[in-house]
Amino acid sequence: MTRTPYGSDDFDSRQFRTAMGQFCTGVTVITTLDGAGAPVGFACQSFAALSLDPPLVIFCPMKTSRSWKVIEQTGNFCVNILSNRQQDVSAAFGAPGDDKFRNVTWDPSPAGLPVIRHALTWVECDVERVTDGGDHHIVIGRARTLGEVLQDKPLLFYRGGYLSTEHPRVTPAQAELENFLTWTGGDTWL
């Protein structure tokens, strides 16, 4: 074991999870329809925008995920970005079970995929590529349709629990944001 003033190279998966829990993420639910037309989905915090041109997203499902197997077969999925009022939705889709949509209202996207009501927004995608990522897959999806953006706060996950953004928004200088893929400020500054 090597010790430095900054940490240790001798760690287990629980310590790694704790360290990664210091990174705040949004919460999404990735959905699709199975071959019989029934909705399936799972809660996913390992989601991000990947590229603007072409419009690509990335998410990382566990290799043991039953919902991922359906998405892999259908080749398409819908990312539902949850609002801070949807902790119950996150809990339902984060728990094991077959009928996660039992108490969740949804509407079909243009391709018929489940769009969860009151999500901040949604993006309908096709699976573009899948790569190995240890005990997870790394899935790249091409965005096909974007949903309406609701004016609400996001559901965030931090240190093993939910977090809210109840503080005033602070906008850094433009130079600080040039490489932020998801910055929504446009090209003009006030």
Image (cartoon, helix red, strand yellow):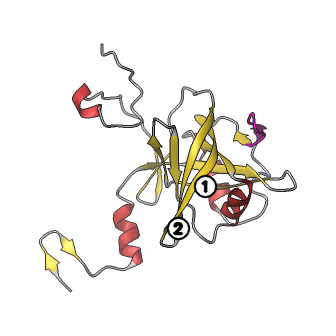
Could you tell whether 182 is left or right of 124 in the image?
left
Q: Can residue 178 be spotted in the picture? A: yes
Q: Are marks 1 and 2 in contact (CB under 8 Å)?
A: no
Residue density around tag 1, few if under 14, some if 14–19, many if 20 or more, within 10 Å: many
Q: Main secondary structure of the magenta part?
A: loop
Residue located farthest toward the bottom when viewing the structure as drawn: 1
Q: Is residue 32 left or right of residue 126?
A: right
Residue 176 position in % (x across, y down): 24, 33
Considering only vertical position in the picture, is 133 above or below 165? below
Give 188 or 8, whichever is nearer the viewer: 188
- Residue ID at (70%, 39%): 115
In space, the residues marked 1 and 2 are separated at their CA atoms by 14 Å
The residue sitting at 12% across, 71% down in the picture is: 5
Q: Could you tell me which secondary element the residue under label 1 belongs to?
A: strand
Q: From this viewpoint, which residue is outermost toward the top?
A: 190
Q: Quadrant of residue 122?
A: top right
Mark identifier at residue 136? 2
Q: Residue at x 74, y 65 (%)?
A: 97
Image quadrant occupied by the C terminus = top left
Locate the N terminus by quadrant.
bottom left
Residue that label 1 marks? 43
The outermost residue toward the right is: 36
Residue 96 vertical position relative to residue 28 in the rendered view, above or below: below
Which amino acid, by three-letter code, is at mark 2?
Answer: His
Magenta stretch in the rendered image = 105-113
